[in-house]
Image (cartoon, coloured by chain):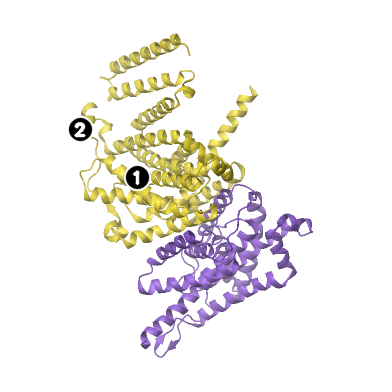
Amino acid sequence: MKLGDVRQRSAVSLAVIIVATIVALLIAPTTRNGVAIAIALDVAVACLATLTFPGLRSSHPVVARAALSLLGVVAVLFVAFFLPSASDFNLATGAAMSIVLLGLSFLTGASGQISLGNSAFMGVGAFTMAIWANHHATTPIFVTLLISVVAGALVGLLLGLPATRLRGPYLAGMTLAFAVAFTAILGEFSSWTGGDSGLQLPTEAKPPHWLISLFHSGTSPLTTSTLWLTDISIVVAGVAFFFMANLFASRTGRAMRLIRDNDVAAELVGISLPRARVIAFVVSSAYAALGGALWTLIDNSVSPPTYSFALSVTILSLIVIGGIGTISGALIGGVIYAYSTNVISWIVNQTGLNPQGNFASQLNGIIFGGLLILTMLFAPLGIAGAVRHFWHRARNRS
Amino acid sequence: MDAFLTSRIIADVLGGLTNGVIYGMVALSLVLIWRSTGVLNFAQGAMPMFATYVGFALLSYHFGYWLCAVAALIVGLAVGGLTERLVVRGLYGKPEINPIVVMVGFLIVLEAVAAAIWSSFPRSLPSPFSSIDWQLGGHPVSLSPFTVYEIGAAIVVMLAVAALFRFTNLGLQLRASALAPEVSRLLGVRVGRLLTLGWMLSTAVGVVTTILVSSNFFTGLTPQVNDGIFAFGFIAAAVGGLESPVGAIVAGVSLGIILQFVQDYLNSNAQIIVALVVLIVALMVRPNGVFTKSSLRRV
């Protein structure tokens, strides 16, 4: 890349940023939250400008991924800003789910293992979050989230050590047994986990004061706690996405893909199979715990039945339909999870089914299970794989 | 040892035996499929559940218990065969997670469809035998006409499967096609048909289990009737080694008895936790199961 080219591009993007800021500041007094719009526009333009640099992806892949993550976060934050509160709540839940899916996608896509224990690992994160918050109410949210992640990673390590010696069906079965046993384990420690009723967070998460004062306190929708929680979820999901994208492309990630494709060859070139399997398992359980901790934060409470085996099945369906082994598949799965309830109740309304009837209440399972089978039989890489396939075909034809 | 302790231990062993033969049969049906097709059938609980619902739908046409049971068995054979032909056949030779995922999907669909048609409320089946325990010296002994029927039926099924594999020409072909499908095919064995037959057999074993469990007065038939039993059955199969039918049954019965003591001396909640610990310990000591000869994997 020529230096002049770089200067030209930087100048253009700087100019666009300045123009966008001026326009936004002009509008600012007439609309609420002009500053927010200005910042969002600026960051988006800066990211886009960075991404259009030719050769950036090969020369500075980490920068490219950071810009892409930031762009995604800003875009979704911007959209969330205008959505109604109920829709924001769905978005936040879906963002947390996409983190869990990223972890499972890494486990399967990178090392060819499969886990049916993700509901339990989510539960570990969710309950760690609630228990810690109840004992140390003053700990900042992000520190508590980190503690939950560490708890999830430790439990993952504990189960991952025997799991490394197991192949496909044994591992799936063992994680299934863990998922089934998890609610019983919660019951055994009811003095910590609150028994059947679960736990309540001591305080509701509220946006910090500087943020409120920045965006015209009181009237701004940014000050509602739902939007604040949505923002947290999206930002955390963005960070998780950034780390995962780097991990996939790293030496470890490449070594794991070799294990998936041919584990004997991987051992022959000197990759330690047990070590790689444990790493993949621990990463996926840490990601699941992060998602679960976010759920506790969003709901402001946690209850044991949420983390039953059925959730593991849902997680598996989402990642398979989205595209197992891919990062974009995890994001697609998160979106599906966020709005599937709305879509299904829309279908029930349109077809005139009795919403309280047996069929309507089982429609979720029938649709998800059916899609799971059809995806695996006819498009094993899910939506992400199908899109990629058609994209390549269209490009090759032209 | 005083009389009370003795009777408590006898009651636990007998009660555990009743549950254990059920776990053993689930484990056996898993092993039958695993050995021949290399698929761990996560829908092993759901397929027989569905067949049992269909068979016992005849109750509303005033058919008796035994006729419904036979009908359920026939439906089970059909469900198993159709599943192998329509769903599983495309999965042989694919990465090992593909069949796992598909069978989990099948499990969801079957449970959802069953709940949609018959609702998720427990449906009580007429029990052919009394579930009231016999008394021994004033103490109930955990043995009733019904549990004798349960254990007896299980033993009959296990002996029938064993006899089929050991003494018949069909059993020889089944074993051959599981052991060396290519060679068997060259020698004129219709391997494809035998795989279908293996799935039919396994589902039929599952139907017997499901009927036994759900004719129990205390549980009844629900779409999720086999979920917990599947977990214990899988643990038994994995501990015994997915390759070994005898190991599956022995592990199932032992697990049943151990868990009965756990329930008696701790609580019923601890059963699945203890089972999980047993599984982890067993797999760490012998990753391929206690009863299998460890074999090298061919590259």
Relative to the observer, which residue lies in front, A264 or B153?
A264
Q: Chain of mark 1?
A: A
**B296 on left or right of A22:** right
Q: Amino acid at mark 1?
A: Val
Number of numbered discs overlaid on the protein picture:
2
Marks 2/1: CA–CA distance: 27 Å
Q: Chain of mark 2?
A: A
Of the 4 image quadrants, the one containing the N terminus of chain B is bottom left
Q: Which chain is the one coloured yellow?
A: A
Q: Label 1, secondary structure: give it.
A: helix
Q: Nearer the viewer, mark 2 or mark 1?
A: 1
Q: Amino acid at mark 2?
A: His
Q: Which chain is the one coloured purple?
A: B
**Does A57 sit above or below residue A257?**
above
How many other residues sit within 10 Å of disc 2, few (<14), some (14-19) or many (≥20)? Answer: few
**A246 on left or right of B248:** left
Residue at the image point whose x is 50% and y is 57% from the top: A173
Residue of label 1: A149
The x, y position of residue A215, in whole percent, is 24, 27
Label whose residue precedes the other's in the sequence (2 or 1): 1
How many other residues sit within 10 Å of disc 1, few (<14), some (14-19) or many (≥20)? Answer: many
Residue of label 2: A209
Residue at the image point whose x is 42% and y is 10% from the top: A8
* Residue placed furthest toward the bottom: B137
Relative to the observer, which residue lies in front, B203 or A55?
A55
Q: Are marks 2 and 1 in contact (CB under 8 Å)?
A: no
Q: Label 2, secondary structure: give it.
A: helix
The x, y position of residue A160, in whole percent, is 44, 51
Relative to the observer, which residue lies in front, B119 or A6?
A6
**A319 on left or right of B164:** left
Residue at the image point whose x is 56% and y is 33% from the top: A387
